[in-house]
């Protein structure tokens, strides 16, 4: 079996070949399938595991391991009983721009599905983190994030009832919460603290997003303030690791 030597911009150093030069069989198969993915293009149907195993003269489990990694990397996706080439990842800017704005910039249609909208007294932990007062009424809104009707994330927003007293009546759940605050309530975002980590979704989260529990997720915690420095929202957003990447402009 010949081993592809892909050194395109952004490719792993030496295409993932270890210094001792011994390439795992599954990785060699993965490299060949990556070339096939380029040839097929977005939406192209991949041959079956059996056909790939025969083509590359390896065991089906070797093919399966290669496919698992390509699925986790977002290069492939399951469709029915087959596997097809996935489209490019959604690139979300690390800024105060909303999810809606970020998705629209890439020519995709953003959307959200409301899971729950509840009102409860602010807990001590939430008060300490978001700069709120323990016991004050707080909204909790949970929504599934969509891009062209594909489920790509799960957003959990906490905001003081005093800041948005008619949220349950005036707000359209599938629209931008940022636009609602700005256009309906006249509230402007000032700054935010943000933290990113990788996690695995809980069984409930995986069910809501429609992914396997083992799929890595990108979790963003955000605490936002308005232009007067007053607490505005606390957001926990879970993004599919195979469908999202994040970008930031840095200046010295």
Image (cartoon, grey):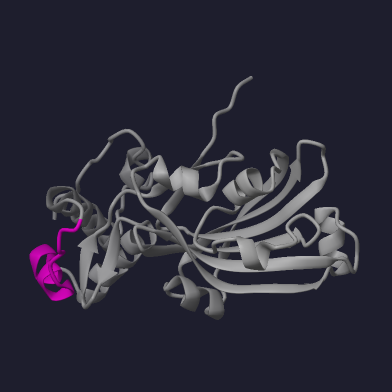
Pick whichever, 215 or 126, lies toward us.
126
Q: Quadrant of the C terminus?
A: top right
In the rendered image, residue 27 lying in the magenta stretch gets the answer no
x, y (%) of residue 120? Answer: 79, 74
Who's the residue at 53% across and 80% down the image?
203
Report which quarter residue 28 is drawn in: bottom left
Q: Is residue 153 left or right of residue 129?
A: left
Q: How many marks?
A: 0
In the figure, residue 47 lies in which quadrant? bottom left
> Please, is residue 45 above or below residue 223 in the view?
below
The residue range painted magenta reads: 43-57
- Rendered residue at 76%/44% (across/down): 225
| Residue 187, x across and y down, in percent | 71, 43
Residue sitting at the far top? 252
- For this view, does 207 lie left or right of residue 21? right
State whether residue 91 appears in this view.
no
Q: Nearer the viewer, residue 172 or 11?
A: 172
On the question of residue 128 being in view, the answer is yes
Q: In the displayed structure, would residue 85 be above or below residue 93? A: below
Please identify the quarter of the rendering in which residue 106 is found.
Answer: top left
> Is residue 143 toward the left or the right of residue 231 in the image?
left
Percent from the top left, x then y, of residue 21? Answer: 31, 47
The residue sitting at 28% across, 60% down in the picture is: 76
Q: Is residue 238 left or right of residue 184?
A: left
Residue 69 vertical position relative to residue 177 in the rendered view, above or below? below
User: Which quadrant of the rendered structure holds the N terminus?
Assistant: bottom left
Q: Position of residue 68 (x, y in %)?
A: 33, 67
């Amino acid at each position: 079996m010949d081993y592809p030597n892909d050194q395109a911009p952004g490719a792993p150093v030496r295409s993932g070949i270890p210094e001792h030069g011994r390439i795992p069989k599954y990785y060699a198969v993965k490299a060949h399938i990556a070339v096939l993915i380029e040839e097929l293009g977005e939406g192209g149907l991949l041959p079956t595991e059996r056909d790939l195993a025969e083509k590359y003269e390896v065991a089906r489990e070797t093919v399966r391991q290669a496919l698992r990694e390509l699925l986790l990397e977002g290069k492939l996706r399951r469709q029915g009983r087959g596997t097809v080439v996935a489209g490019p990842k959604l690139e979300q800017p690390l800024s105060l721009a909303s999810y809606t704005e970020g998705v629209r910039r890439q020519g995709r249609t953003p959307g959200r599905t409301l899971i729950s909208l509840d009102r409860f007294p602010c807990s001590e932990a939430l008060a300490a983190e978001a700069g709120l007062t323990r016991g004050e009424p707080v909204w909790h809104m949970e929504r599934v994030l969509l891009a062209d009707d594909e489920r790509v994330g799960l957003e959990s927003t906490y905001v003081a009832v005093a800041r948005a007293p008619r949220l349950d009546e005036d707000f359209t759940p599938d629209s931008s919460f940022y636009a609602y605050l700005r256009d309906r309530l006249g509230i402007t975002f000032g700054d935010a603290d943000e933290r990113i980590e990788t996690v695995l979704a809980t069984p409930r989260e995986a069910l809501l997003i429609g992914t396997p529990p083992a799929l890595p997720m990108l979790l963003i915690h955000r605490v936002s303030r308005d232009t007067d420095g007053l607490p505005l929202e606390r957001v926990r957003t879970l993004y599919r690791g195979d469908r999202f990447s994040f970008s930031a402009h840095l200046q010295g």
